[in-house]
Image (tube, helix red, strand yellow):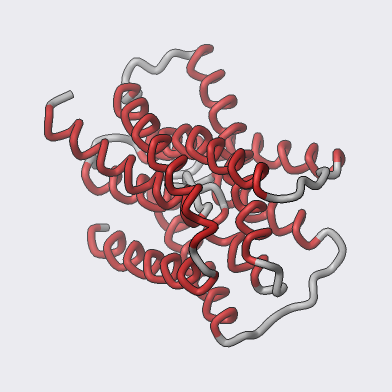
Amino acid sequence: MVYNDLLTLILIGFFSGSLVGLLSIGGGIVIVPMLHVIYPDIPIQDIVIISLHQIFFSSLTTYITHRSKQKNTKKNIYWLFLHFSSLIIAAYVLHLLSEGLISILFISFIIISLIIRVLNILEIHVKPFNYYNETMTTTCATFGSLIGLGGSLLLYPTLRLSNQPYKKVLKECAFSSLSVGLLGTIFHDLLFLLNINQEFPWAMMIVLTISSIITARIASLKTYSLNQTIIDNISFILSVVIIIVYCYYL
């Protein structure tokens, strides 16, 4: 790995880790489009797998931070089974999708999240139904795992749409990213152990993961000093920029 590549990957890792820590959204929103544009020869499925590894390790530090600062609530065991089963299926389906379809799903995911954020800005709220959080968490996480995102980019505005406190929502988002990264990491690493992929960019994944962990931990401690409006605005602006840049290069 040449020096320029190493520096680029470290910077991407630092930036994605900061997003995970501050906003509790998976760093995949940065990693997937940037790696796809900078390294077009790498299959997008491999880029998604790199993103899932980074999401797991960086969101783990974020989730630990939120657990220590908020009251812990038990998860429904039946929902957890359904949630993790959905993520395993999504990890398998990823390898059946074409590169073009994954890119379209990626853009669609961000656009949907933007639409819901606009509803939040207009102060349009919905009344949550039974198991609203669980349903939305699984749906967003499953969708996100297909494109290398933790699901929180869509989950955050969706939960805010039900007028829930943003700190509680951040914790739910941290769990979503953690579960997506965990299942993606386990599933894909098992596949590689059974059928070793010599072409997979392991060094790239390690550099991105380590650099993102560092900033994720630091940034997660700063989250509680930010107010809701700042977090909402940063997420909204970032989503718009990613859509414009990614569509331009594609």
The residue located at (78%, 62%) in the rendering is 132
Q: Quadrant of the N terminus?
A: top left
Where is 231 relative to 101, above or below?
A: below
Residue 36 located left or right of residue 177: left
Residue 46 located left or right of residue 157: left
Could you tell me residue 135's position as x and y percent? 76, 56
The residue located at (63%, 65%) in the rendering is 166
Q: Quadrant of the C terminus?
A: bottom left
The quadrant in which residue 160 appears is: bottom right
Q: Between 166 and 43, which is closer to the camera in this rendering?
A: 166
The quadrant in which residue 119 appears is: bottom right
The residue located at (56%, 18%) in the rendering is 190
Residue 116 located left or right of residue 236: right
Where is 74 relative to 166, above or below?
A: above
Where is 184 relative to 226, above or below?
A: above
Q: Between 211 and 86, which is closer to the camera in this rendering?
A: 211
Q: In the orientation shown, which residue stands out farthest toward the bottom? A: 122
Could you tell me residue 156's position as x and y percent? 59, 62
The reply to whether residue 96 is in sight is no
The reply to whether residue 60 is in sight is yes
- Total numbered labels placed on residues in the image: 0
Could you tell me residue 57's position as x and y percent? 50, 32
Could you tell me residue 216's position as x and y percent? 44, 42
The residue located at (65%, 39%) in the rendering is 87
